[in-house]
Image: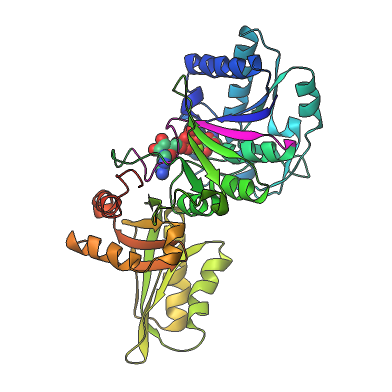
Amino acid sequence: MALIVQKYGGTSVGNPERIRNVARRVAKYKAQGHQVVVVVSAMSGETNRLIALAREIQAQPDPRELDVVISTGEQVTIGLLAMALMQEGLQAKSYTGAQVKILTDSAFTKARIVSIDEQNIRADLANGCVVVVAGFQGEDEAGNITTLGRGGSDTTGVAIAAALRADECQIYTDVDGVYTTDPRMVPEARRLKSITFEEMLEMASLGSKVLQIRSVEFAGKYKVKLRVLSSFMDDPGEGTLITFEEDNKMEQAIISGIAFNRDEAKITVRGVPDKPGIAYQILGPVGEANIEVDMIIQNVGVDASTDFSFTVHRNDFDRAMDILKNQVQPHIGAREVIGDNRIAKVSAVGVGMRSHAGIASKMFRTLAEEGINIQMISTSEIKISVVIDEKYLELAVRVLHKAFDLDQEAA
Ligand code: ADP
Ligand code: ASP
Ligand code: MG
């Protein structure tokens, strides 16, 4: 007998028939003698609908009230799934995040889980009950409803698995595993049998939203056995297992995947004085406004001035431009501030990069051969990212996927 946590995403619970399907899968596991906790998302499209509704009332919704609104999607699904499980002849009980007591900090719309009280869940499991928990939500010390950021049900699933020391956390979604790149963009993408936590963390943070970043962090930290599988296949097979590097020596491609996102915007401050303190004077006010900065480039000045570029999330673009034009530029005497929110970031990720030279030059040559201009570059031990014009994104992902032989079965 094993204790299994299964998480189902929005499309997997998108209508009553799919909810019944989930119930049937859970019944199969129960029939094999396993204990099952199910974590569910809101029905597909629901969270977006709730956000849009909030914005109709308040252009910049109050974060506490926004969480009150957007946490309701998951509450609907847990009730429906518990009913569907009963229809399968199982005992089932639903819990909101607050009812479990998933305690989080008070950072509304992006709260972090602090602790989980697993006593009630354990008691229900011991009584033969299937426990259904709402993903994406928790409660802070003061009893306010919080949410965990978009895609946060993955993190609920993994955190519950960690708290219960479950044998496995299965993430059921609309693809049958983690692919070499988003299969919706590149049909030749291949499912990976396994990927290391480190690589998955990079892939997730660079735009592969198949798993929320924090769920991968959590699984790595608490050593949760994490697997991504299809909820649409009767027999989903092995899916993709997220592994530790030392266990994954066999299948060691140099590059494991290509990630991309269109979530960022670029800002360039031209003609800034090339002297100590300038980066701080530019980025200090941006940080104070709680705007996260990702890639940064500062040129070497030939005369006494230089250019300084960085990227921010597109949602923060207007606010960042405003701060730079109205506070920073007059203060430091820069020539101009220009912005571009039609950029995309493409990244190659792989732990094999550590021991192989020439990956960056292959990436740059491949893009050059297609006439794609690289605007910014950043690297770490296991990834190389470039910023390009958004209109070349699909082409860039396709040619890089091919150049690194990701469409070929690993030898
Ligand atoms: P869910 O609603 O189940 O949480 P998501 O939409 O959050 O599902 O995540 C699944 C989607 O992630 C897939 O439909 C796919 O388009 C996308 N995706 C992006 N990159 C990858 C990748 N490397 N491998 C698999 N899926 C990916
Ligand atoms: N329903 C939430 C979202 O759409 C959480 C999730 O699906 O993981 O972001
Ligand atoms: Mg998701």
**Is residue 45 visible from the viewing direction of this image?**
yes
Q: Quadrant of residue 329?
A: bottom left
**Is residue 56 visible from the viewing direction of this image?**
no
338 part of magenta stretch: no
Q: Residue 287: x percent and y percent?
A: 55, 67
Q: Quarter of the image containing the N terminus?
A: top right
Horizontally, residue 381 falls left or right of residue 90, namely left
Q: Which residue is nearer to you in this view: 373 or 237?
A: 237
Q: Quadrant of residue 157?
A: top right
Q: Which residue is nearer to you in this view: 342 or 198?
A: 198
Q: Residue 355: x percent and y percent?
A: 44, 66
What residue is drawn where x is 43% and y is 59%? 352
What residue is drawn where x is 57% and y is 44%? 149
Kindly report the secondary structure that dominates the magenta region of the rendered protein.
Answer: loop
Asked which colour scheme the image uses, the reply is rainbow
Range drawn in magenta: 164-183
180 part of magenta stretch: yes
Q: Residue 173: x percent and y percent?
A: 48, 31
What residue is drawn where x is 24% and y is 61%? 367
> Eyeballing the image, is 203 above or below 26?
below
> Eyeballing the image, is 328 above or below 319?
below
> Eyeballing the image, is 120 above or below 271?
above
Horizontally, residue 362 falls left or right of residue 171, namely left
Q: Residue 191: x percent and y percent?
A: 40, 39
